[in-house]
């Protein structure tokens, strides 16, 4: 694995790059030519990471030496000092008192790292860069299990965080305390290459030395994670930002990169509690410039105006696709496959198309399986923004209250603290903008956890459904379930939208309760990607009578009508404004999306209990393996509806 640290939409990402060579360092070895080759190789592999992290080139040569020989020489320059509380001095001003009372992460004991070398430390010295080891590295899905099973880990973490630990065996209480306190110590990075699972952010806690370094708004040192490829080991680098004398404190900025004072205040909440309830928690739709920036970031080029493509009624369409399920199951005689993209009438691709402008100019009659600007629904932060057109600043009833943690952190903190004061449920689910399968998705009632998750990758946080409609599984009990519908968007203007009559169900494997929030099989329903998990499957025509048996006062036809109304409202607001504020009206576009939803209990003004649909996400090019297995004609139906305009012969319902 090759790695390099760089910022990408709010996260630290590790990916290989190339860079210039290092300056000569006579201490690296006796052979100048061999040293030069080693330095050049090191720079080519790690130079961009060091540049992105701001590590001055004067340190690179000694850094290579320390990495190759695993030199941990911070002890020769620094010491850890325990600070005891002293009685207040009546003559002490308020600023001095606040500085003295500055909370130390984790416990009542306060520690500082100071320069102990009698000659101080000079920033110009090439040796003034230091390796900090990592005491614990994990992905959050495995944190509890590691604390319970890795010998000595819980004891070390408890000591590092200032948590009392009694006995040798891990106790549930001690594990919970460490999992809560760890957000004052966690650092993170993300791998840019590999499988979806490998790209899930990595969290790590520096060793006792690194974890004792305190915060300062004007720090004396900088730190950055660094992955050393030859040894496949991650370290944290520490280097000075100025000269320091003996006795001066080593500090770093816990909110590094945040210039806005309000955002910094929010980011520093885990260490410096603050009451932000007086801030407005209202989240109106972002300005038009927000969507223009997204279009530019996605490098999507909008098409020129074209006339709708016209084909004879008996035309056989040549389809170019890289989707295996289409190749295996599209058998309709009006469609044939071609291996030449240039000869195709229909491009049905798995990856996102970008250059609509060129295609519209050169091949306007070529039909597609996607729309320009459809990320307004398929990316979670945009979905929440666009939905506010239907429900105002708090969003519509069919979407859980959602905040963009990159742009709406203060509003979220205020809303969280307001709910906390009112004694309302405060369970939240933190989700990446653009990952599926519940990857890197976390349920928590910890404000600190949510604030820190903002650093790992771009995320939204949505109100967790604390009162879901449950389904009684005879083998398990009352469990959560979600529903997937396939919707087919034929055109934007006029808006023409269908829903496939067959829907798919997913079930949790354990009875639902608002506890054990990291118990995947209790709180999540996606079980089909892990061969070790039980996958409960039920056809929709079996589900409906069983559902009505369990909830006789809620006929499925009525429940589904509310679901379809939510779909209709969503696509109406998404297509109501011109691009990039809404879906682009491109006559050659068609698309299939999967909408995942749950049902929750809610109350009307008259007190009557209702089942309220809650849309969870909209998926582009969803996995249709189950659809094809259970209904082999599935893609024939999809293509007939979208490309032949023959929905009457297909099991679809027209919504608009």
Image (cartoon, rainbow, N blue to C red):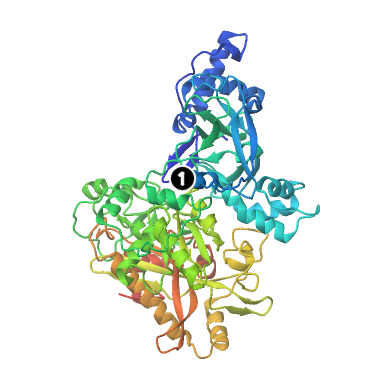
Which quarter of the figure has residue 579?
bottom left
Instruction: Give coordinates of residue 85: x percent, y percent.
Output: 62, 46
Q: Is residue 201 above or below residue 431?
A: above
Q: Is residue 620 above or below residue 58?
A: below
Q: Is residue 297 above or below residue 20?
A: below
Q: Decide if residue 558 is on the left or right side of residue 527.
A: left
Instruction: Please say whether residue 645 is visible from this viewpoint.
Output: no
Instruction: Please say whether residue 589 is visible from this viewpoint.
Output: yes
Instruction: Give coordinates of residue 485: x percent, y percent.
Output: 45, 70
Q: Decide if residue 6 is on the left or right side of residue 344.
A: right
Q: Which residue is mark 1?
A: 95
Q: Decide if residue 402 is on the left or right side of residue 539.
A: left
- The kind of secondary structure element at disc 1 is helix
Q: Residue at x 40, y 50 (%)?
A: 263
Instruction: Give coordinates of residue 496: x percent, y percent.
Output: 29, 70
Q: Is residue 88 above or below residue 579?
A: above
Q: Residues within 10 Å of mark 1 (few under 14, many from 20)?
A: few
Question: Closest to the observer: 24 or 507?
Answer: 24
Which quarter of the figure has residue 603?
bottom left
Q: Decide if residue 294 is on the left or right side of residue 33.
A: left
Which quarter of the figure has residue 28?
top right
Instruction: Give coordinates of residue 136: x percent, y percent.
Output: 66, 43
Rendered-image quadrant of the N terminus: top right
Question: Closest to the observer: 275 or 134?
Answer: 275
Residue found farthest to the front: 91
Rendered-image quadrant of the C terminus: bottom left
Q: Residue at x 39, y 69 (%)?
A: 487
């Amino acid at each position: 694995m090759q790695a390099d640290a760089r910022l990408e939409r709010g996260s630290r990402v590790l990916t290989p790059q190339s860079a210039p060579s290092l300056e000569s360092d006579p201490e690296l070895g006796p052979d100048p030519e061999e040293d030069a080759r080693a330095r050049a190789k090191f720079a080519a592999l790690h130079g961009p990471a060091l540049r992105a992290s701001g590590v001055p080139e004067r340190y690179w040569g000694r850094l290579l030496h320390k990495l190759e020989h695993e030199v941990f020489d911070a002890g020769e320059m620094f010491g850890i000092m325990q600070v005891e509380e002293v009685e207040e001095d009546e003559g002490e001003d308020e600023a001095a008192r606040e500085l003295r009372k500055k909370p130390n992460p984790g416990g009542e004991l306060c520690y500082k790292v100071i320069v102990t070398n009698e000659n101080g430390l000079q920033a110009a010295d090439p040796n003034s860069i230091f390796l900090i080891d990592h005491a614990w590295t994990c992905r959050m899905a495995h944190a509890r299990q590691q604390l319970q099973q890795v010998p000595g880990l819980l004891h070390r973490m408890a000591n590092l965080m200032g948590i009392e630990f009694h006995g040798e065996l891990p106790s549930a209480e001690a594990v919970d305390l460490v999992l809560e306190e760890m957000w004052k110590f966690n650092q993170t990075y993300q791998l840019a290459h590999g499988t979806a699972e490998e790209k899930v952010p990595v969290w790590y806690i520096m060793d006792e030395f690194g974890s004792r370094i305190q915060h300062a708004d004007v720090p004396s040192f900088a730190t950055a994670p660094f992955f050393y490829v030859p040894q496949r080991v991650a370290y944290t680098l520490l280097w000075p930002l100025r000269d320091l004398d003996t006795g001066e404190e080593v500090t770093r900025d816990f909110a590094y990169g945040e210039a806005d004072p309000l955002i910094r205040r929010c980011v520093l909440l885990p260490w410096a509690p603050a009451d932000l309830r007086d801030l407005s928690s209202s989240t109106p739709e972002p300005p038009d410039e927000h969507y223009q920036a997204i279009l530019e970031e996605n490098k999507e080029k909008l098409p020129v105006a074209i006339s709708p493509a016209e084909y004879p009624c008996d035309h056989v369409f040549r389809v170019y696709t890289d989707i295996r399920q289409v190749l295996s199951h599209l058998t309709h005689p009006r469609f044939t496959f071609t291996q030449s993209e240039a000869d195709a009438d229909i491009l049905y691709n798995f990856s996102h198309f970008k250059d609509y402008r060129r295609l519209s100019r050169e091949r306007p009659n070529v039909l597609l399986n996607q729309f320009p600007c459809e990320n307004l629904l398929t990316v979670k932060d945009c979905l929440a923004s666009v939905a506010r057109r239907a429900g105002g600043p708090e969003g519509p009833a069919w979407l859980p209250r959602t905040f963009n943690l990159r742009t709406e952190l203060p509003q979220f903190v205020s809303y969280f603290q307001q709910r906390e004061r009112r004694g309302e449920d405060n369970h939240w689910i933190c989700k990446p903008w653009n990952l599926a399968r519940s990857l890197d998705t976390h349920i928590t009632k910890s404000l600190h956890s949510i604030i820190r998750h903002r650093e790992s990758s771009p995320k939204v946080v949505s109100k967790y459904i604390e009162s879901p409609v449950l389904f009684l599984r005879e083998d398990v009990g009352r469990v959560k379930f979600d529903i997937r519908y396939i919707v087919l968007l034929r055109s934007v203007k006029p808006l023409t939208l269908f829903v496939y009559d067959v829907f798919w169900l997913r079930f949790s494997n354990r009875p639902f309760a608002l506890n054990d929030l990291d118990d995947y099989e209790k709180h999540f329903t996606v079980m089909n990607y892990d061969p070790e998990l039980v996958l409960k499957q039920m056809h929709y025509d079996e589900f409906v009578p069983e559902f009505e048996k369990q909830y006789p006062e809620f006929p499925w036809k009525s429940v589904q009508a509310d679901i379809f109304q939510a779909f209709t409202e969503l696509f109406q607001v998404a297509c109501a404004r011109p691009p990039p504020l809404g879906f682009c009206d491109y006559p050659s576009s068609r698309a299939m999306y999967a909408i995942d939803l749950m049902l929750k209990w809610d109350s009307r003004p008259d007190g009557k209990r209702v089942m309220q649909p809650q849309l969870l996400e909209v998926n582009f090019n969803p996995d249709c393996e189950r659809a094809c297995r259970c209904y082999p004609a599935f893609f024939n139906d999809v293509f007939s509806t979208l490309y032949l305009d023959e929905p009457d012969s297909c099991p679809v319902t027209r919504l608009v």
